[in-house]
Image (spheres, coloured by chain):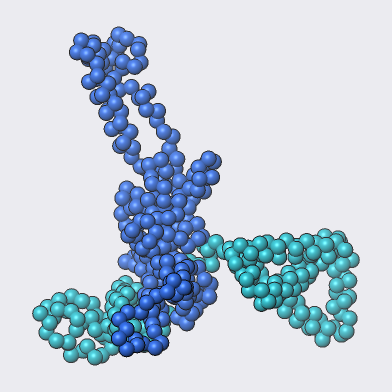
Amino acid sequence: SHGGPPPWSHRKEDPTMLSSATNSLLRPMVRTAARRHNNATLDLSRGMTILSKQSAEEYKKENYTERMKNTGRPVSPHVTIYAFPIAALSSITVRVTGVALSFGAMGVGMLELFGGTGTSLSVFQDLGGAYGPLVAAGAKFSVAFPCVYHYLGAARHFAWDEKPDLLTNIDVEKASYALYGSSLFISVGLMIV
Amino acid sequence: PTERKTKIGQVSRNAGTMLSSISTSSRHVLALTKSLAIRGLATTTDASLKVGSTAVHPPRKERIKYFKIYRWDPEQRQKPYLSTYPIDLNDCGPMMLDALIKIKNEQDPTLTFRRSCREGICGSCAMNIDGVNTLACLCYIESPDDKKSASSGKATKIYPLPHMYVIKDLVPDMGNFYEQYRSIQPWLQTENGKSEGQAEFLQSKQDRAKLDGMYECILCACCSTACPSYWWNADKYLGPAVLMQ
């Protein structure tokens, strides 16, 4: 029989009111929540998903991530195991090439600032001539590809802004392959020229 | 290793029917033959009369496939790891869930996962199989093209839904997902209320058509847990499943 809520039910130790809802005879057997970093035992009351009006208030009280940190549970693997679709890969490549271009532009800026006007041009001419054709080709490709890919990727975004009907699974998949293919083709062309 | 109890049962059943269909006198001859054969003194070379011949049912070659499954025990202070299990596909149902249940029954009873309907309607068995979030009960172990080639070379990797807090093995904590669903008040709401004397809200065919494509959602969380934005901002971003509802 229900003997009423225990005297500590208003305090932090019983946030989900497990103790008041539990039979008073069984109460000592129920582990009440202790907000401590304890690796051996898991926080029973806050770890479990007991959906109720109380749980809704619970979730509002504290950030979910913060609460889960106290349980000691691991986060399941994500980036390392997920099979990203070509659309996701093409999108993140736009961002990666953008970051690379930023660093490249900053590098050129630094060279010009500290080396005087024309330093970067002489560096490029050095790379092109002094170290052989392989290094020259590699250098040309590593500049051409980010420029071309990022530019075409942005163009793709503008196309989507104008025609959102193109944002279907099939069309975006085709567009991703087209983006990779055309960027590679143009970059190799620029590398050879 | 999986046991092939059914094969032994089949052989003995066949031998029994063979014996019962032969006349009495022949049966005596056969019994004599059998006892002599046991003593290594067979008097006949007719293979079809030999008791216990396995020529009736040709033995099937094993098709072993390996499953690498994410494991974590909250009671042990260990990091999560991958356990590898071999399954003879000739002895197993076609779906991933069949393989999981077979592993749990025969090899490792501690393997923990959620499951219920086994027909793709409840959403319990949602997990990440070979990098793709899907329902284990609907995911074929081998696609029909695979069956032709020797597909048992590559191991299947099974993980829980990505970037979720793991309760045990393949069981993630769905609390946040359910609370987000609750927060959108997932029921039909009216703006104007009922007019005087109105009994029920009638639904036109056009109104019903608006629900198509959305009412079928079983809230398995495969889509939300596939979204990198939901990985990084699960507390603020509701995720595709909840947004669609």
- For the residue pair B38 and A89, the one nearer the viewer reads as A89
Residue A127 in which image quadrant? bottom right
Nearer to the camera, A112 or A178: A178
| Quadrant of the snapshot with the N terminus of chain B | top left
Q: Judge left or right: residue B198 versus residue A136.
A: left
Depth check: A48 or A32 in front?
A48
Viewport quadrant of the C terminus of chain B: bottom left
Tell me the quarter of the picture where residue A1 sits.
Answer: bottom left
Residue drawn at 40 percent across, 46 percent down: B87
Q: Where's residue B88, x and y in %? A: 41, 42
The correct choice, above or below, for B177 with respect to B50 in the image is below
Outermost residue on the left side: it is: A1
What colour do you see for chain B? blue
Colour chain A appears in: cyan
Q: Quadrant of residue A176?
A: bottom right
Which residue is more in the foreground, B128 or B241?
A: B241
- Residue B81: x, y in percent? 43, 60
Is A170 on the left-hand or right-hand side of B205? right
B223 shown above or below B67? below
Can residue B169 be seen here? The reply is no
Q: What residue lies at 41% left-to-right and 51% top-to-bottom?
A: B95
Q: Residue at x 29, y 84 (%)?
A: A54
Q: Position of residue B112 (x, y in %)?
A: 34, 60
